[in-house]
Image (cartoon, rainbow, N blue to C red):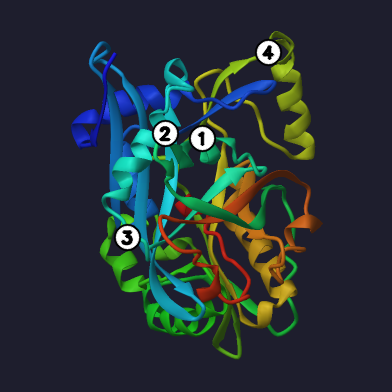
Amino acid sequence: MTITVRLGTPADNAKIQDLVTKITMPGVAQMCFQRAPDFFTGAKVIGDEFVLMVADDDERPDVLAGLTVISGRELFISGQKRRVYYSGDTRVDPFYRRRGIASNLFIEQKKFRTGQDLLQGIVLKENTAPLDAAAKTADGVLFSYWISHAIETSFVFTRKITPRVPQGVQMRAATAADVPGMQAFFDREAPRRNGYPVYDFAKLLSGDPYYAGLTIGDYVLATRNGQIIGMLAGWNQKAYKQTRIVGFKPIVKLLRPLYNLYVGMGGGFKLPPVGGVLNYLTIYNIVVEKDDKAVFQGLIDWLMVHQGQKYDALAMGLTHGDPLEEVPRGYKRQKLFSSHFWLSYGDDPRPSIDDRPLYVELGRL
């Protein structure tokens, strides 16, 4: 067996889909995070540039032993625009575990980075074992990383409600005519958080692949006296990004119809048959003036009533320490905990990052 690492291309898409499907989360319902049918559509949403490395085995040409992607995008860091790279989608075929595949992939990725580049990533519940394994090579330590924030992802169960809108505030869907005001509001407010992606609403209108599947009408605006004081969007990404059910434990398979009947009355995720996908809408581009919790709650409520009724849940991620983190906790929801980390092939980047709250855009992970 000889492993070769090279740049991935669209010609690898079928083998990439096969590899991704092999990586599942254990549980009563076995799930897989997919980017089907075209892995590259999802990659262009994560960053406006990306380097995809894949690992081939000369004895098994029909499969990929592993892959990793590092994507670049402009973020606000310490109030300034900075190119930051996201290390994500590192997958190794279970057949090749403990054979140093991840390290080989990161060694090749290093050729595209400098010691001054700032990288970030996400791991589930501080599960840093894969990072530790990838960082160690025969020549020593390839990169260093530092856990920075806990992330609390909420799947808020949708239900029929009357939106709780603060007195004097109006809620409505955005139109193309709102774009100049939305851009001005965003440019003023977004730098208050580290890690906030730099957004250009003119590119959204023009159909840039960075915003695939998102339209200006997916935004809800909160206004007071005609001025925007908050906004967010509901982004349906199921056309290229899915959480797919690939198996059930026998007892769950048997009880699935009764469970779905129960959550249909009380709220929650309905379990689709094997091969089906979880039905949720991603809350995106959260910006609220003065971190007004009542305005944020009103935006979530409005989205739930107007877009959310087609979905089982609204998904949003907030880091611990964010002034808005308490708001999703007031809803019936399912929680998922993960950890954000900074990564560097050179010096510790943390001295250049101030203590503003960290923003994590769930739709770009």
Task: Estimate the spatial distance between the alpha carbons at disc 1 and disc 4, rounded to whole Å.
Answer: 31 Å
The N terminus lies in which quarter of the figure? top left
Point out the frontmost of discs 4 and 2: 2
Q: Earlier in the sequence, mark 1 or mark 4?
A: 1
Going by the numbered disc 2, the residue's amino acid type is Ala
Task: Estimate the spatial distance between the alpha carbons at disc 3 and disc 2, rounded to whole Å.
Answer: 19 Å
Residue for badge 3: 114
Of residues 154 and 59, which is closer to you in this image?
59
User: Circle 4 sits in a helix, a strand or a loop, which is it?
Assistant: loop
Quick check: marks 1 and 2 in contact, CB under 8 Å?
yes
Q: Earlier in the sequence, mark 1 or mark 2?
A: 2
Callout 1 crowding tier (Cα within 10 Å): few <14, some 14–19, many ≥20: some
Q: Position of residue 173 (x, y in %)?
A: 51, 68
Task: Estimate the spatial distance between the alpha carbons at disc 3 and disc 1, rounded to whole Å.
Answer: 21 Å
Q: Which residue occupies the extreme bottom position in the image?
A: 225
Residue for badge 4: 249
Q: Which residue is found at the position 35% from the left and 37% from the top?
A: 105
Quick check: marks 3 and 1 in contact, CB under 8 Å?
no
Residue for badge 2: 102
Callout 4 crowding tier (Cα within 10 Å): few <14, some 14–19, many ≥20: few
Task: Estimate the spatial distance between the alpha carbons at disc 4 and disc 3, rounded to whole Å.
Answer: 46 Å
User: Circle 3 sits in a helix, a strand or a loop, which is it?
Assistant: loop
Going by the numbered disc 4, the residue's amino acid type is Lys
Of residues 314 and 93, which is closer to you in this image?
93
Going by the numbered disc 3, the residue's amino acid type is Thr
Quick check: marks 3 and 2 in contact, CB under 8 Å?
no
